[in-house]
Amino acid sequence: MSEKQQPAKKLLKAAIVPVTPFQQNCAILWDNATMTGAVIDPGGDVNAILDAIKHVGATIEKIVLTHGHIDHAGGAAELKERMGGKIAIEGPHRGDDFLLRGLAGQGAQFGISGSRNVQPDRWLSEGDTVTIGGFVFEVLHCPGHSPGSVVLVNKAQKFMLVGDVLFRGSIGRTDFPYGDHDALINAIKTKLMVLGDEYGFLCGHGPGSTIGLERRSNPYIV
């Protein structure tokens, strides 16, 4: 008599597509069991994103934006259109509305062609949840880098999407007219550093990290 076959463990999988001259970490996240998922921060280079989606074989159900800067949101409108126009764009917080309405201008300023203004189907607020392939992420509003920056936290997987709020060994820039260094540090310390050391995160640029590593070595936090 053969052993009863155990169902495959439900896993959240990720693929990173560096986009725009800023090499922003556009992420494709999907559930390995259902193969459904989302695209996080499609800043541009939409052809490369579509190629990656085809390669991993995921069915994209939504686009999620962590904030409104060109390298994170500039390709969202085109990606939605080229995927049939029926998937929703969720996020960021409404505080970044002015940035999303100015994406075409940001693109012209930085020499990024094809950037289009975008209006999310759903704004995100503190305490909301976002579902990606069956995995539920809690929304934390973490202003400072931009007024509407959000962080998404999945407590079951101990995994976060932090956009440009926090980096390995650094934090998001606040030298914009609307930037707020004190607000960013406060959000990091009161909302992210209260999580366990084992929480890992994917950031908008460069390698990911863990809360424990940043707690011990990030000069902006230590």
Image (tube, helix red, strand yellow):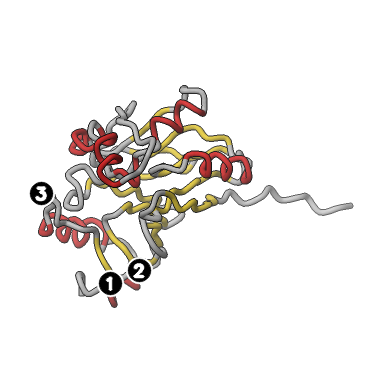
Check disc 2: other Cα within 10 Å, few if <14, some if 14-19, many if 20+.
Answer: some
Q: Is the residue 164 above or below the residue 63 in the image? A: below
The reply to whether the C-beta atoms of the residues labelled 1 and 2 are less than 8 Å apart is: yes
Tag 3's secondary structure? loop
Q: Amino acid at mark 2?
A: Asp
Q: Residue at 26%, 47% (x, y): give it.
A: 140
Residue designated by label 3? 177
Of the 4 image quadrants, the one containing the C terminus is bottom left
Number of marks present in the image shown? 3
Q: Earlier in the sequence, mark 2 or mark 3?
A: 3
**11 or 68: which is nearer to us?**
68
Residue 32 on image: x %, y %: 60, 46
> Residue at horizontal 34%, vertical 65%?
196
Residue type highlighted by circle 1: Arg
Q: Which mark is residue 197?
A: 2
Task: Name above or below for residue 220 compared with residue 110.
Answer: below
User: Which residue is identified by label 1?
Assistant: 215
Q: Residues within 10 Å of mark 3 (few under 14, many from 20)?
A: few
